[in-house]
Image (tube, helix red, strand yellow):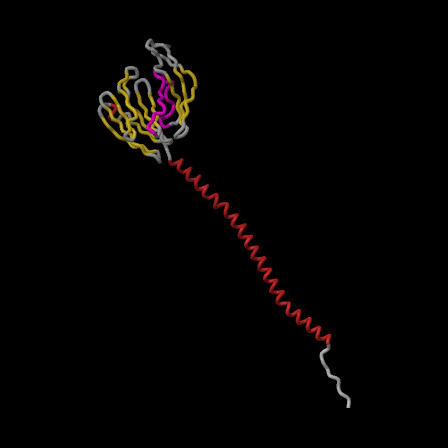
Amino acid sequence: MEKEPKQGISGGTIIIIMIICIIVGMAPGYILGEKIINKKEATTEQKEQKKDNSKEEATPEEEQPKEEENNNQKQEETSKKSTSLDVSKDCFNSGKCEKEYELSNGEKTIKVRIMSNSSSIYIYLNDNDILQFNTSDPNMGNKSVNKIALLDTDHLVIETKSSARKERYYFDNNNSMINHIFEAPYDTNNTFANDITSKEEIHYYSALGCDSQGKYRSLYKYKFTIISSTKYSIEYIGEAKTVCAGQS
């Protein structure tokens, strides 16, 4: 009796099965690795995008304080304004009297006190004596206080008036007089062109426009300009002529 041959798995089949197992085993690892790589690339992309966005947003944030600072400065400049008072009819111009005034330019406030007796006027700035003069002047006639002003540059201006001319006295933050200017006497063409609050004015230097014999005397003409709270200029313009009494 013949034995039947045993049937089994051939060597080629085993090799094929092993290759399939290896492929099946590697597939999840490959897929997982690809997912990790894609995730890393996406994360890197997101980080770079966030950096770019942060750079774009940083510019307006940095510029914003500068814009706010400029706006605040403009607002401060517009809020500051020169102010003046006409005091020509007040009591100290006609006898013994004392009055106090408060002036503000929107940022700074000062107190001006004016006292008078039968012959003199005294002016105080924040209780500091800054100016005094005789009410009677043999050359200019009776002298009185006409106007006072506080400029937006913080300068105090006092304007006096006599029958011959107006005069202006300028004081800085230290209560010091920086200039004393006046109109040319006896000549209506050589009067102040601008209001007391103006920071520019033409003025003259000469004791009198005419001598004792009624003859012409030279007047030296200048332009006075206040540039800022600490700067001003005096520019020589030339010589001005005036008409004396009795001359034609």
The relative height of residue 41 versus residue 207 in the rendered view (above or below) is: below
Q: Which residue is found at the position 30% from the left and 27% from the top? A: 86
Of residue 187 and residue 197, the one placed in the foreground of this image is 197
Residue 203, image x and y in percent?
38, 20
- Image quarter where the C terminus lies is top left
Image quarter of residue 1: bottom right
Residue sitting farthest toward the bottom? 1
User: What is the x, y in percent for residue 233?
Assistant: 41, 24
**Horizontal and vertical percent for residue 239?**
42, 16
Residue at position x 66%, y 72% in the image: 21
180 magenta-colored: yes
Q: Which residue appears farthest toward the right when viewing the image? A: 2
Residue 214 placement (x, y as % from top left) = 34, 10
State which region is magenta.
174-197
Give 38 or 137, whichever is nearer the viewer.
38
Q: Quadrant of residue 110?
A: top left
Residue depicted at x 55% and y 55%? 46
Q: Quadrant of residue 243?
A: top left
**Up-down relation of residue 235 to residue 52 (above or below):** above
